[in-house]
Image: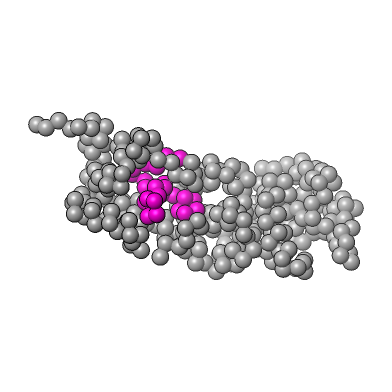
């Protein structure tokens, strides 16, 4: 599986990406179609557009932090 | 000049947006790949690199054989991650706060227990008890889950008499099979004072002591783990 870094990508491009996935942004947070903040289920916090981890499988949005990433790997298996 | 439809986005764009711009074709390609499970996007690739390093480590290979509970597995991995972040104070502190926010003191203490290499000693100690294989996970997980009650992290600033009284009280009232005392560096002197106070009483309560002290060559700090455990004679706790 390819890993793509979002570090140097513009906010505008990140927003366009999530829009193509059916999501939105207010410039800070990732929002679902109802306008509610998307919550990282492992840490129960909203996901920010400048610190995302986007995985396939019903498009999972998480915060880019070691706890969320480790929890994702435990639940869904290794990122090959 | 065409008005921007979304004022918030345009402010964000103006203030922070100087990064790589993806074309429509590129974006469509990424969406296709994501839907085919061929790609993952992440702000900082190092986060995944460290997670992989932890999962591929020999240490995790051993721990994962005996730590089965989902939450304890994550906390153990966080302990190994904390150790890898020790050279980056900012990320180390961020992760500590993240663990505390999600799991509280209990979770943070378990992770720090693992970070300071005490879990390996606990596993070794458990093997020495010669208990059936199927009981080993139960024993180790029980020790981790009861970390707030039956493990004490001694610090330099602690009052040895007060700590000794607390330990004795817990041993008398709760009678755990094992009580752990942990210390790092300068706190070791305090631990010695505590053990001196406890020595006679421990025997009366039916407990023995096993000291594990480690100072690796080149290591910054000595680490001590003291096992205060119930004496078992002929398979029966005394």
Q: Nearer the viewer, residue B217 or B79?
A: B79
Q: Residue furthest left?
A: B1
Quarter in which the C terminus of chain B is drawn: bottom right
Q: Is residue A14 left or right of residue B209?
A: left
Residue in the image at 45% along x and 62% along y: A78
Q: Position of residue B73 (x, y in %)?
A: 58, 56
Residue B58 sits above or below residue B172 on the image = below
Q: Is residue B137 left or right of residue A24?
A: right
Residue in the image at 39% along x and 47% along y: A61
Q: Position of residue B63 (x, y in %)?
A: 60, 63
Q: Would residue B235 be seen by someone viewing this image from the given angle?
A: yes
Q: How many marks?
A: 0
Quarter in which the N terminus of chain B is drawn: top left
Specify the quadrant of the image occupied by residue B230.
bottom right
Q: Is residue B196 left or right of residue A13?
A: right
Q: Position of residue B188 (x, y in %)?
A: 69, 53
Residue in the image at 27% along x and 47% along y: A20
Q: Is residue B157 left or right of residue A39?
A: right
Membership of B210 in magenta stretch: no
Q: Nearer the viewer, residue B99 or A22?
A: A22
Residue range in magenta is A45-73
Specify the quadrant of the image occupied by residue B131.
bottom right
Q: Would residue A3 be seen by someone viewing this image from the given angle?
A: no
Residue in the image at 50% along x and 53% along y: A71
Q: Nearer the viewer, residue B62 or B2?
A: B2
Q: Position of residue B59 (x, y in %)?
A: 57, 66
Specify the quadrant of the image occupied by residue B46.
bottom left
């Amino acid at each position: 599986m390819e890993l793509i870094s979002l570090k140097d990508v513009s906010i505008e491009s990140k927003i366009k990406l999530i829009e193509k996935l059916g999501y939105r942004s207010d410039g800070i947070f990732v929002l679902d179609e109802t306008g509610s903040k998307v919550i990282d289920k492992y840490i129960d916090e909203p996901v920010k557009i400048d610190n995302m981890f986007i995985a396939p499988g019903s498009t999972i949005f998480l915060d880019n932090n070691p706890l969320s990433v480790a929890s994702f790997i435990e639940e869904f298996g290794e990122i090959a | 000049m065409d008005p921007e439809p979304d004022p918030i986005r345009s402010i964000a764009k103006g203030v922070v947006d100087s990064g790589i711009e993806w074309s429509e074709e590129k974006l469509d390609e990424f969406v296709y790949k994501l839907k085919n499970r061929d790609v993952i996007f992440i702000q900082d690739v190092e986060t995944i690199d460290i997670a992989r390093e932890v999962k591929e480590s020999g240490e995790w290979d051993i721990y994962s054989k005996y730590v089965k509970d989902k939450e304890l597995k994550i906390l153990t991995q966080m302990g190994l991650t904390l150790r890898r972040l020790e050279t980056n104070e900012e990320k180390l502190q961020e992760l500590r706060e993240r663990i505390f926010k999600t799991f509280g003191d209990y979770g943070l203490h378990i992770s720090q227990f693992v970070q300071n290499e005490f879990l390996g000693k606990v596993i070794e100690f458990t093997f020495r008890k010669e208990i059936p294989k199927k009981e080993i996970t139960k024993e180790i997980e029980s020790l981790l889950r009861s970390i707030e009650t039956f493990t004490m992290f001694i610090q330099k600033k602690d009052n040895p008499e007060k700590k000794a009284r607390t330990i004795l009280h817990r041993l008398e009232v709760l009678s755990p099979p094992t009580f752990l005392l942990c210390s790092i560096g300068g706190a070791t002197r305090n631990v010695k004072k505590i053990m001196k106070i406890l020595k006679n009483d421990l025997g009366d309560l039916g407990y023995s002591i096993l000291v594990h002290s480690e100072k690796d060559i080149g290591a910054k700090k000595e680490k001590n783990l003291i096992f205060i455990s119930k004496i078992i004679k002929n398979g029966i706790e005394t």
